């Protein structure tokens, strides 16, 4: 679990470093400019770390499933080599996904100016600048990526259904509490990540506005990576005691 947490932390750090420094620079220097190559690099790394987060959360769900539903086979199914292979597959798949999206997106001609309605470069905002008939390939890639993400989501839901079926059969209350405490941080991180991203991209057009889009983009691109380490760290008793002392003090 801690090996996957390390990979998740690196993904969160990369995600924040992709968008926040440039946004802070533009705010401090009162500018809204980004170079064409800088926009391409920002899009690549954003998609890369965003995809890595999804794949790592899926792998971590499998880790929870095996540890609770098949504990006697944990060492066989999730040895150090298997964990390294799964983490490498998550990073490699995310890299390929980001490379395909970036190469395809920036091969399209601009027809509607070069002003983005966002504080960082993301695919939906960039597609608004392209000619209406030229981005069908990118839409196809987006559909594929969304389908892949939905597949990960279905796998996670199915795994947790099996996990909760096993946990509810545990006779001792202490055993159930220990099993739930293992799963709850992952569920909290997953819920925060999916809910903010889903609302940002699936909200009705009738409630869309530049200010709301900005708030939602901050919610799903900055807030989850920033809160993930805190959510997982709350399992540490010393940290919880220090946080409680800070709150009541």
Image (cartoon, grey):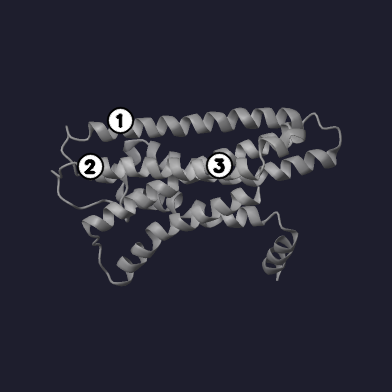
Q: Calculate the distance from the C-alpha at mark 3 to the C-alpha at mark 1.
A: 29 Å
Q: Nearer the viewer, mark 2 or mark 3?
A: 3
Residue bearing mark 1: 140
Could you tell me residue 65's position as x and y percent? Answer: 67, 34
Q: Calculate the distance from the C-alpha at mark 2 to the C-alpha at mark 1.
A: 16 Å
Q: Calculate the distance from the C-alpha at mark 2 to the C-alpha at mark 3.
A: 38 Å
The label shown at residue 23 is: none
The label shown at residue 128 is: 2
Residue bearing mark 3: 85
Q: Quadrant of the C terminus?
A: bottom right
- Under circle 1, the secondary element is helix
Indicate which disc, 3 or 1, sits on the residue closer to the N terminus: 3
Q: Quadrant of residue 19?
A: bottom left
- Say which residue appears at 38% left-offset and 46% top-offset: 47
Indicate which disc, 2 or 1, sits on the residue closer to the N terminus: 2
Could you tell me residue 135's position as x and y percent? Answer: 22, 35
Estimate how packed mark 1 is, as few (under 14), some (14 to 19) or many (20 or more) residues with alpha carbons within 10 Å: few
Q: Nearer the viewer, mark 2 or mark 1?
A: 1
| Residue 125 position (above or below residue 10) | above
Q: Quadrant of residue 24?
A: bottom left
Could you tell me residue 210's position as x and y percent? Answer: 30, 50
Could you tell me residue 175's position as x and y percent? Answer: 82, 40
Estimate how packed mark 2 is, as few (under 14), some (14 to 19) or many (20 or more) residues with alpha carbons within 10 Å: some
- Under circle 2, the secondary element is loop
Work out whether residue 108 or residue 198 is closer to the camera in this orientation and state it.
108
| Residue 66 position (above or below residue 9) | above
Indicate which disc, 2 or 3, sits on the residue closer to the N terminus: 3
């Amino acid at each position: 679990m801690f090996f996957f947490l390390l990979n998740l932390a690196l993904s969160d750090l990369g995600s924040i470093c992709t968008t926040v420094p440039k946004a802070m620079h533009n705010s401090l220097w009162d500018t809204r400019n980004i170079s064409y190559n800088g926009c391409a690099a920002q899009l690549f790394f954003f998609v890369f770390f965003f995809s890595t987060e999804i794949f790592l959360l899926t792998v971590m769900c499998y880790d929870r499933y095996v540890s609770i539903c098949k504990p006697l086979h944990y060492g066989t199914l999730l040895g150090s080599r298997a964990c390294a292979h799964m983490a490498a597959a998550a990073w490699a798949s995310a890299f390929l996904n980001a490379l395909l999206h970036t190469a395809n997106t920036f091969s399209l001609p601009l027809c509607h100016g070069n002003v983005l309605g966002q504080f960082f470069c993301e695919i939906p905002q960039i597609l608004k600048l392209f000619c209406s008939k030229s981005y069908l390939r990118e839409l196809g890639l987006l559909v594929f990526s969304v389908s892949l993400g939905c597949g990960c989501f279905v796998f996670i839901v199915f795994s947790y259904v099996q996990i909760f079926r096993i946990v509810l059969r545990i006779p001792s209350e202490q055993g159930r509490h220990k099993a739930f405490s293992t799963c709850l941080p992952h569920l909290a991180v997953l819920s925060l990540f999916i809910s903010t991203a889903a609302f940002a991209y699936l909200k009705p057009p009738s409630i869309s506005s530049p200010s709301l889009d900005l708030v939602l983009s901050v919610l799903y691109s900055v807030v989850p990576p920033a809160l993930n380490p805190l959510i997982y760290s709350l399992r540490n008793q010393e940290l919880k005691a220090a946080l409680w002392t800070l709150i009541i003090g």
